[in-house]
Amino acid sequence: GAVVSQHPSRVICKSGTSVKIECRSLDFQATTMFWYRQFPKQSLMLMATSNEGSKATYEQGVEKDKFLINHASLTLSTLTVTSAHPEDSSFYICSARDRGPQHFGDGTRLSIL
Amino acid sequence: GQQLNQSPQSMFIQEGEDVSMNCTSSSIFNTWLWYKQDPGEGPVLLIALYKAGELTSNGRLTAQFGITRKDSFLNISASIPSDVGIYFCAGQLRGAGNNRKLIWGLGTSLAVNP
């Protein structure tokens, strides 16, 4: 149980492109979903927290107009990196929880050329 | 942002050896979680702890929620090559609110020599 699916697993695109990443809870309803960014050999850095049907809460220093989060249903949240630039290249990971601990997707490796 | 003090930063051991790692904080936590992350993948939950003093096992893994609520340890017994990876502790602060945001350790990188 508690399976979280994240898609795509890898994206390579040109600078200026907008990229959408999907996060789905497959066998449970996720009241809260989280989006993280992870740099090589570092810990997870929380970007934002989203609850179904409400606006996401962004962490300090994270541009909400740059990283658009939509949590339209209890099983789906999306992160859109708008007008991506090379400095946005990173490993993005989502997690989801209902009442228990967070369960994670397998991450999306984003490379902006 | 706030982070937990996790140690050791890395370990290189022989197959069959036991491993111990821990996390400490100056703040009180309501929940301690231990995750393992393999390269290029998301973290996988190993053990969740919810009560001070709680000792929980998952196969060869054992973790404890410290009595002071400010620390936790994870032990791995009789290590095997597939134990290789990065282990993260994460905690939820008392009064974290409904979103249950986690505070993360910096990770312990484990290498096992067959």
Image: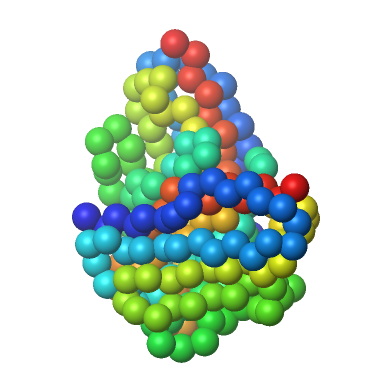
Nearest the camera: B36 or A55? A55
Q: Which residue extends farthest bottom?
A: A54
Residue B88 visible in the picture: no
Identity of the residue drawn at 45% across and 63% down:
A22
Quarter residue A102 falls in: bottom left
Q: Quadrant of the N terminus of chain B?
A: bottom right
Find residue A111 and report its horizontal and vertical position in percent.
67, 47
The residue drawn where x is 51% and y is 61% is A21
Is A113 on the left or on the right of A110, as rendered?
A: right
Residue at 47% from the left image edge and 42% from the top image edge: B41
Residue B108 picture location, percent across and down: 56, 39
Depth check, front residue: B110 or B38? B38
Q: Residue furthest top?
A: B114
Identify whether A25 is placed above or below A29.
above
Q: How is the image coloured?
A: rainbow
How many numbered discs, if any?
A: 0
Residue A112 visible, this angle: yes
